[in-house]
Image (tube, rainbow, N blue to C red):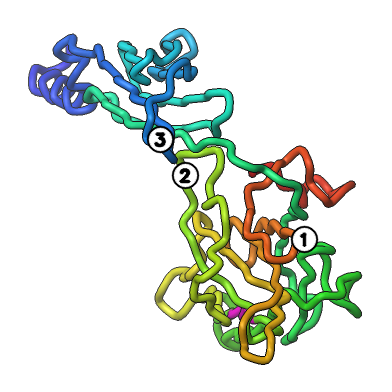
Amino acid sequence: MRSKPLVRLTFLFLLALFPDRAFGQTSRTVRVGVANDLTGDPVSEAEVEVVFLGYSGADTQRKSGLTNNAGVFVATGDPPLRIHTSVECDGFYSFESGRLSRTKDHEIGVNLRPIVNPIPLFAKRLQVVAPVVPGPFYYDCGVGDWVAPHGKGKSKDLEFSVRSIRDADRYTDFHYTLNLGFESDMDGFVRFEQRKDSGFRSPYRAPVDGSYKSEFEYFRKREPGSGMETNARPGGGYFFRLRTVVDEKGEIVSCHYAKAYGDIPDLKIYFNPTPNDPNLEFDPKRNLFQGLDPLDQVREP
């Protein structure tokens, strides 16, 4: 027979894990308010789904419906694990809430990003594997390949160089750097943070008057007695100003804009072939690259 102290300890352990179930209080309410991200106006008739996730499909509850004239939808359910909310609406990019706690009610303000002016772009994934060490070597964003003699590219849009040091006595210890630079003094990059809650994760347009930086160093290293270190930001992004031409006063006459999701050495690059057009809202159905390998394809706007 199980001893009383053991039974008591088991009960306390389960109580700590599942406090709501211990007292029969599992019902949670999720109130979703949907607005236009650009205007702030309520969005009616948006399709909202609230998932109260269970331990199995039978335990999972899905509550869905449309927002009212005030842009509001309310759902109630019993979540054994966690809660998740998604929103879709014609003319807007989708919304994903991520994981929500099952231990409380939620009021979620959703700012849906409208579809404004998606255009065809050259969009392709670039995994930087150095064709020559230490470099420099160049990547053509409009061709999607390294510049000759390492590929079919012609324009030196992105310049890379590599430096790698490995400890002769400890093979697992190393210091690897990959430097990003540009051919023109007026070319450069500006970083941004991706919108993780939206199907469209970048600003619509590259900054025209922004202070573009000319160099960036990515590193990955492991030193004695420490774990792996890196300055990569997979959830970040870049705007690029490329192929810049200036007049005799140093004023920009012509340039091209591009963006990238991810971080060096794994980037998804979008290049606008129209000079002086900062629009980088991509239409995934109109990629200017054709016949890409599945690993190189880009599906995000």
**Residue 62 in sight from this viewpoint:** no
Is 21 magenta? The answer is no
The answer to whether the residues at label 1 and label 2 have Cβ atoms under 8 Å apart is no
Q: Residue 76 or 133: which is nearer the viewer? A: 76
Image coordinates of residue 243 in percent, x first then y, are: 73, 75
Q: Name the residue under label 1.
A: 273
Image coordinates of residue 34 in percent, x first then y, are: 39, 26
Q: Give the residue type that dot 3 points to.
A: Asn
Quarter assignment of residue 17: top left
Q: Residue 86 or 35: which is nearer the viewer? A: 35
**Residue 288 in sight from this viewpoint:** yes
Disc 1/disc 2 C-alpha distance (Å): 27 Å
Residue drawn at the location 58% of the way across and 64% of the way down? 239
Residue drawn at the location 62% of the way across and 68% of the way down? 240
Q: Residue 234 or 92: which is nearer the viewer? A: 92
Is 180 magenta? The answer is yes
Residue drawn at the location 72% of the way across and 58% of the way down? 272
Disc 3/disc 1 C-alpha distance (Å): 31 Å
Predominant SS along the magenta part: strand
Which image quarter is the C terminus in? top right
Q: Mark 2 points at which residue?
A: 196
Q: Give the range drawn in magenta.
A: 177-181
Residue drawn at the location 71% of the way across and 80% of the way down? 245
Image coordinates of residue 80 in percent, x first then y, are: 33, 18
Give the number of the disc on residue 111.
3
